[in-house]
């Protein structure tokens, strides 16, 4: 089977990403390149600022293939920083500010980065790394007075543009090296999305998420406008406001965020011409809601190792939302093969096999991991290009009679939750290092609300309720998305006749015999919190000491908790309050404190009376 779409052999410009951008800036200097709130930068302004910073980086020793760490939230300055790194000839290493210090330190050391572009308030997290720090700031004072013309970067298309770390099955994150050529394959003359000077593309993904590659370079390499979402966790309300304010025409959302936005604010994306969904299996019900409103929905598919997308179903139909939505066909300059278990024999249409990806979108490999690179990036036995390689995705698909691919699952333990790739082995390895854990397994289970949650199953002689201590332990080692939200203590892990863990026999989190009895709400405020949680989580019996995340909550639902409580009470809690105060009892205390601070002139009795009136009303 050989699935090729569009111009698989179409020539790709032999240029770097920053060179392609510079051409746009030269041709349309006065066109707006990006917007952020009320601020605007033209292509010429962005180009000159990035050039100044690039000269500064060159003076710091940055050149071809040199890594530069970047730690910041969404802003015009961080876009300037990424462009400047490429103009200096280097490649960027995106660091998520929310990652634990130990993981950030590993990524810095593993990448070999020596220079760090960082927001001043985050600089303290890297004090012990020995990195040379350059502050990310609106006026770029450190680069003031440097030339506004581009330095000679020395970079070529096969040099790295960025290294992005993903979860690793052995417990060690792996850095995927993506070249300039890889990025241009994604965004140049794209046949799966509308990317042209008339479009406004929304930027909302974290830099450490490869969806940002499409957002930033898809816009800036095509003369479009990049609308940068305000900093913080994206919410349905903030996305709706950004879409309205900037007249967004193209938006890419991870599957979990897409589902959340459409469920909670069905009209938020109604004016967007094209909505791309990626990162996990597309949810038919929510896709159907948008298609019925006349919005073009694109179901995008692709691992980080293939530079964001390698296949897409453009223009999902209503008929396709009645079942599994296809992941589509190969995008331009991409070749897809479906092969049998031997990794070579191609299977006919209708039969399941592993998907292999070829073409200039296939990444260089895993940084510093030659054995793993050789295992997953294999020689192409079908093509005619000398030295060409295929990436083994590990995904199982079938080709339908219409030539569209359908996704069926994985051939290993990799899973996706809210768009994040999770290697269960990495979670299990971290748990296995805890001194009070004799054995551990991680698995994905559905929540009562129909979402997916990561569950930790542990065998321990001393941890009666393992959730809180193990969660805090893992949060020092792993990103939040790799920390199980529900926990079950077992006397022993269930084994099959071969002595391997029988994952099908693992109980659901609600069957945990160590779970404490439910404590009913004791105050009107606790009652309100419990009611909001019950509505969002589809859990009937919630006690005031139950943990929001162990009940199936996640960051997207946390934003709705604060929104719904804001409708009941005259205060606005930050989303971080749900992470810090994870039980109804603790969150009720935060609510009372916030209201008391606002109405300090009232007595406690008056405050309680006011809250009762609000609840009853």
Image (spheres, helix red, strand yellow):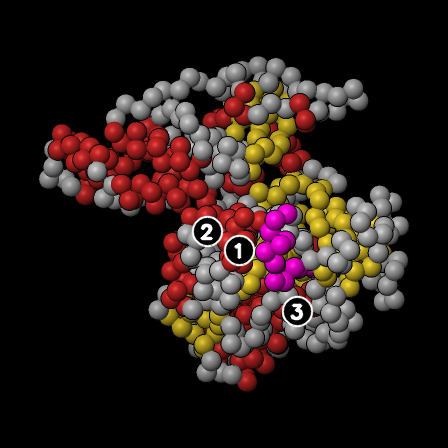
Q: Which residue is mark 1?
A: 253
- Magenta-colored span: 309-323
Residue 328: image tag: none
Q: Which residue is tagged 2?
A: 261
Q: Taking 330 as reference, is 263 above or below it?
A: above
Residue drawn at point x = 36 percent, y = 20 percent: 519
Residue 578 visible in this rendered orientation of the protein: yes
Q: Residues within 10 Å of mark 2 (few under 14, many from 20)?
A: many
Q: Are marks 1 and 2 in contact (CB under 8 Å)?
A: yes
**Residue at horizontal 55 percent and vertical 45 percent from the top:** 418
**Residue 92 visible from this viewpoint:** no
Q: CA distance from mark 3 to mark 2?
A: 26 Å
**Relative vertical location of residue 559 with respect to residue 301 in this rendering, above or below:** above
> Residue 72 or 63: which is nearer the viewer?
72
Q: Quadrant of residue 615?
A: top left
Residue on which the image places disc 3: 191
Taking the image as shown, residue 516 lies to the left or right of residue 116, namely left
Left or right: 440, with 376 as reference point: left
């Amino acid at each position: 089977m050989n699935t090729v779409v569009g111009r698989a052999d179409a020539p790709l410009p032999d240029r770097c990403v920053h060179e392609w951008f510079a051409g746009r800036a030269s041709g349309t200097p006065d066109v707006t390149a990006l917007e952020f709130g009320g601020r605007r930068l033209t292509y010429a302004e962005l180009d000159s600022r990035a050039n100044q910073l690039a000269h500064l980086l060159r003076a710091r020793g940055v050149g071809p293939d040199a890594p530069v760490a970047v730690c910041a939230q969404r802003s015009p300055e961080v876009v300037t920083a990424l462009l400047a790194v490429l103009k200096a000839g280097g490649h960027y290493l995106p660091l998520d500010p929310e990652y634990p210090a130990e993981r950030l330190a590993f990524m810095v050391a593993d990448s070999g980065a020596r220079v760090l572009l960082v927001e001043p308030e985050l600089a303290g997290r890297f004090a012990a790394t020995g990195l040379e720090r350059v502050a990310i700031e609106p006026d770029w004072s450190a680069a003031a007075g440097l030339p506004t013309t581009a330095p000679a970067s020395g970079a070529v298309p096969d040099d790295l543009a960025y290294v992005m770390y993903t979860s690793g099955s052995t417990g060690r994150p792996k850095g995927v090296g993506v070249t300039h050529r890889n990025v241009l394959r994604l965004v140049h003359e794209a046949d799966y999305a509308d990317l042209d000077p008339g479009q406004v593309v929304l930027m909302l993904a974290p830099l450490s998420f490869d969806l940002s590659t499409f957002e930033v370079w898809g816009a800036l390499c095509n003369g479009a406008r990049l609308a940068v979402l305000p900093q913080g966790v994206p919410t349905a309300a903030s996305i709706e406001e950004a879409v309205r304010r900037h007249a967004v025409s193209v938006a890419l959302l991870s599957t979990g965020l897409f589902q959340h936005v459409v469920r909670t604010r069905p009209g938020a994306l109604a004016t967007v011409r094209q909505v791309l969904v990626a990162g996990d299996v597309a949810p038919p019900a929510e896709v159907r809601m948008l298609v019925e409103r006349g919005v073009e929905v694109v179901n995008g598919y692709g691992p980080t190792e293939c530079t964001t997308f390698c296949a897409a179903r453009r223009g999902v139909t209503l008929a396709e939302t009645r079942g599994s939505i296809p992941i589509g066909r190969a995008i331009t300059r991409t070749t897809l093969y479906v092969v049998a278990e031997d990794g070579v024999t191609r299977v006919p249409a209708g039969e399941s096999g592993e998907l292999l990806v070829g073409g200039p979108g296939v990444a260089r490999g895993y940084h510093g991991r030659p054995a793993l690179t050789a295992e997953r990036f294999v020689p192409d036995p079908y093509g005619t290009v000398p030295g060409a390689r295929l990436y083994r995705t590990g995904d199982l698909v079938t080709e339908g009679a219409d030539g569209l691919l359908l996704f069926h699952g994985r051939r290993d333990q990799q899973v996706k939750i809210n768009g994040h790739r999770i290697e269960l082995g990495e979670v299990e390895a971290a748990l296995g290092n805890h001194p009070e854990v004799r054995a551990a397994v991680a698995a994905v289970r559905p929540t009562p609300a129909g979402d997916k949650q990561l569950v930790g199953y542990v065998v321990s002689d001393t941890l009666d309720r393992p959730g809180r201590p193990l969660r805090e332990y893992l949060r020092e080692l792993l990103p939040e998305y790799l920390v199980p939200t529900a926990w079950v203590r077992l006397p022993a892990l269930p084994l099959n006749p071969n002595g391997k863990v029988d994952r099908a026999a693992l109980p659901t989190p609600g069957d945990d015999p160590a779970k404490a009895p439910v404590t009913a709400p004791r105050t009107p405020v606790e009652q309100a919190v419990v009611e909001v949680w019950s509505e969002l989580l589809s859990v009937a019996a919630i006690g005031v000491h139950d943990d929001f995340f162990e009940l199936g909550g996640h960051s997207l639902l946390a934003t709705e908790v604060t929104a719904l409580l804001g409708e009941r009470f005259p205060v606005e809690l930050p989303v971080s309050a749900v992470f810090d105060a994870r039980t109804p009892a603790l969150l009720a205390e935060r609510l009372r404190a916030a209201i008391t601070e606002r109405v300090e002139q009232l007595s406690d009795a008056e405050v309680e009376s006011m809250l009762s009136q609000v609840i009853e009303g």
